[in-house]
Amino acid sequence: MSSLRADPPTSKIHPEAEETTSCLCSSSKIDHFDRLPDSLLLFVFNKIGDVKALGRCCVVSRRFHSLVPQVDNVVVRVDCVISDDDTSSSSSIKSHSSSSSSSSSGFSSIFRLVFGGISKPFQALTQLLGPKVNSRNGNGPSLSVATDDDMELDQAAVTHHSPTQVLKNFNEIRFLRIELPSGELGIDDGILLKWRADFGSTLDNCVILGAASVITNNKISRVMQQENAAAADDDDNGSIPESFYTNGGLKLRVVWTISSLIAASARHYLLQPIIADHKTLDSLVLADADGQGVLCMNREQLEELRVKPLSASSASKRTLVPALNMRLWYAPHLELPDGVVLKGATLVAIRPSEQAASKKDVSDISWVSSTFEEPYGTAAKMLVKRRTYCLEMNSF
């Protein structure tokens, strides 16, 4: 007779739990970023764009370090501007940073763009993308990026990298935006001045919008509208009043126009090395955080500059501005749909004389009215409906 015998007790009471723990331990050693394709990581890096953030990404891993140079959308934000005749001392840097608008009268000054407050992770990008250079290297115009080896070092110990060097190992840049901390033009508080310029090897076109003052209070807007209703009726469908010529209004607009053109041509001149080094560029924008001025170049214009070298002004380090044809629109008071009132609103559309003569559609001003973002786009559309005044300006 056979006897039944129980199986010996197992030593593993909870085998499933142990297997789960083992799996967790092994999975914790896996770098899940390695499972993401390069194309997805590049998509994320392109959304980041900011060169400082990309510098921090470089220290994450060797893979990130190798992928960052393949980014095609880069944004360079500048923290302060230093002129060539300035010293490297901490006091001069802080003074210039806090009063950049007051020092803008010297348009012939050569600007350096300097990053401030850069932490150690950004050093990885500068080590990857270029050697260090002295902050006073050469007499020509240059844009420079400041880095330091220790956040506790004073400003005198800061070394500089030009954007050309910082960007030189980005091999696939298609869209590049450089943003200054403020506009170059020192204007009084309350004055509105905005410009946009398109360049190839020289100026293609420029649009300037200005106003003596901007009033946003709706109650004041209504009062002004009532007080100036009669004046608007006598405005002869947009003609400029006689007082515009006698009270300095015309002179002020000429100063705005010349100043904007000088600022735009100085920006254009400083972009030459970057344009020469990056043949893949489709778009280049040099703007400022104040929204005062924007210089734009598309792919055709960039290629034109590479093929046809620019003409430099003998008076200062900037691109020569050709002879110009200008059209001006003026309104003593311009009330926008949102209640904002522009006093002494002025719109100037500029094209080189040679280009204007060759254009068959001279009357086409659609490019003017679509230049600015709202609410100033609406202001431009309202102004171009008024009487047009034509002016000419010699090359300078």
Image: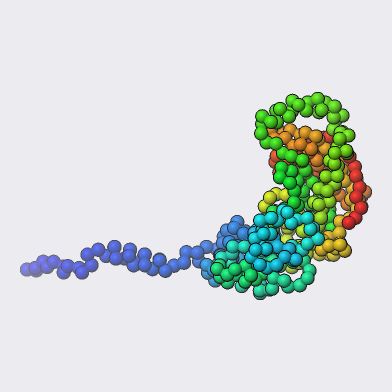
Q: Residue at x 68, y 68 (%)?
A: 88
Q: Position of residue 204 (x, y in %)?
A: 84, 53
Q: Is residue 170 above or below residue 206?
A: below
Tell me if I can see residue 126 in this picture.
no
Q: Residue at x 66, y 34 (%)?
A: 217
> Seen in the image, is 327 located left or right of residue 219?
right
**Which residue is more in the foreground, 83 or 113?**
83
Q: Position of residue 32 (x, y in %)?
A: 47, 64
**Which residue is more in the foreground, 286 or 90?**
90
Quadrant containing the C terminus is bottom right
Q: Position of residue 307 (x, y in %)?
A: 84, 64
> Seen in the image, is 102 located left or right of residue 124?
right
Quadrant containing the N terminus is bottom left
> Seen in the image, is 8 located left or right of residue 326?
left
Report the coloring of the rendering: rainbow
Tell me if I can see residue 319 in this picture.
yes
Q: Residue at x 68, y 73 (%)?
A: 133
Residue extending furthest toward the left: 1
Q: Residue at x 68, y 36 (%)?
A: 216
Q: How many marks?
A: 0
Q: Is residue 2 above or below residue 356?
A: below
Residue extending furthest toward the front: 91
Which image quadrant for residue 13?
Answer: bottom left
Which image quadrant for residue 277?
Answer: bottom right
**Which residue is more in the foreground, 367 or 256?**
256
Which image quadrant for residue 95?
Answer: bottom right
Q: Is residue 327 above or below residue 283?
A: above
Q: Position of residue 256 (x, y in %)?
A: 81, 48
